[in-house]
Image (tube, grey):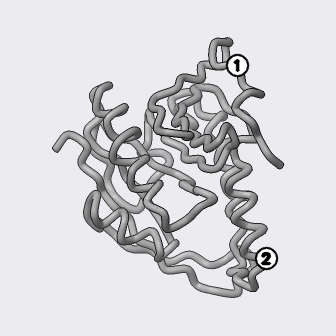
Amino acid sequence: MTINIEDKDLNSATCMDVLFVRKNEKFVVDKSFDIKYLSPIGRYVQWKLENNCWDDYNELYHAAKLTQDLKKHADVWFDTHCLFRDDLLTGVLLIVGGDLEKLETKYGIEDESLLLKYFHISDKGQGYGSFWLKSVVIPYYEGTGFKHIYVNSSHKDSFPLYMRLGSVIATYQQMSDNNLYCREGSCFLVNIDD
């Protein structure tokens, strides 16, 4: 599935705002949610299948479930950040705010904090994620008074990025979808008011 930014009216009631433009890239945030925004995650799951990298964990299923669960909490909100390259959706990340203590129990959550969930970019290892977080997402939320972003990840390739931005505050283990593998994860705290 390919989503073209032209399919989305940036001036409509969807609450989609362009936060930053760089060459052929548009970094946007949408206060509403469209399931199509998860297509970069679906492409990642498909890549794992096609490249014999299946790890018994379907990120698309879990991200879709998370968005539906979040909608059930009146005291929790989430923003969908999208990266469009050449007007095609190539990246997505979710930022969750509100009463986070009911969502996260691995560690205590400080006031004025956010959770980063499901951060996927089709072109991995190109520095897009680091730029997106440091130059677009963090300044956006710092400008609205937030001080911390918590991130949980079991994708070891993402650990160096989160370590550059913050520090490990906890570790965890979880079984894969069909109990085939034990996934090792780390929890990171990023201080955005530094």
Q: State how far apart marks 1 and 2 are (Cα).
A: 34 Å
Q: Nearer the viewer, residue 69 or 62?
A: 62
Residue at 77 percent across and 28 percent down: it is 7
Q: What element carries label 1?
A: loop
Q: Residue at x 69, y 72 (%)?
A: 57
Q: Which residue appears at 66% of the width and 53% of the height?
A: 63
* Percent x, y of residue 66: 65, 49
Give the crowd class for mark 2: few <14, some 14-19, many >=20 residues within 10 Å.
few
Q: Where is residue 153 in the image (x, y as percent from the top left)?
A: 48, 66
Which residue corresponds to the image point at 26% horizontal and 59% vertical from the top-left? Answer: 166
The part of the image, by quadrant, that contains residue 28 is top right
State the residue position of label 1: 9
Q: In which quarter of the image is the C terminus?
A: top left
- Who is closer to the viewer here, 104 or 124? 124
Disc 2 marks a residue whose amino acid type is Leu
Q: How many marks?
A: 2
Classify residue 17 by image quadrant: top right
Q: Where is residue 5 in the image (x, y as percent from the top left)?
A: 70, 32
Which comes before the other along the chain, label 1 or label 2?
A: 1
Give residue 49's mark.
2
Q: Is residue 44 left or right of residue 123?
A: right
| Kind of residue at badge 1 | Asp
- For residue 52, which quarter of the picture? bottom right
Q: Is residue 59 rendered to the left or right of residue 103?
A: right
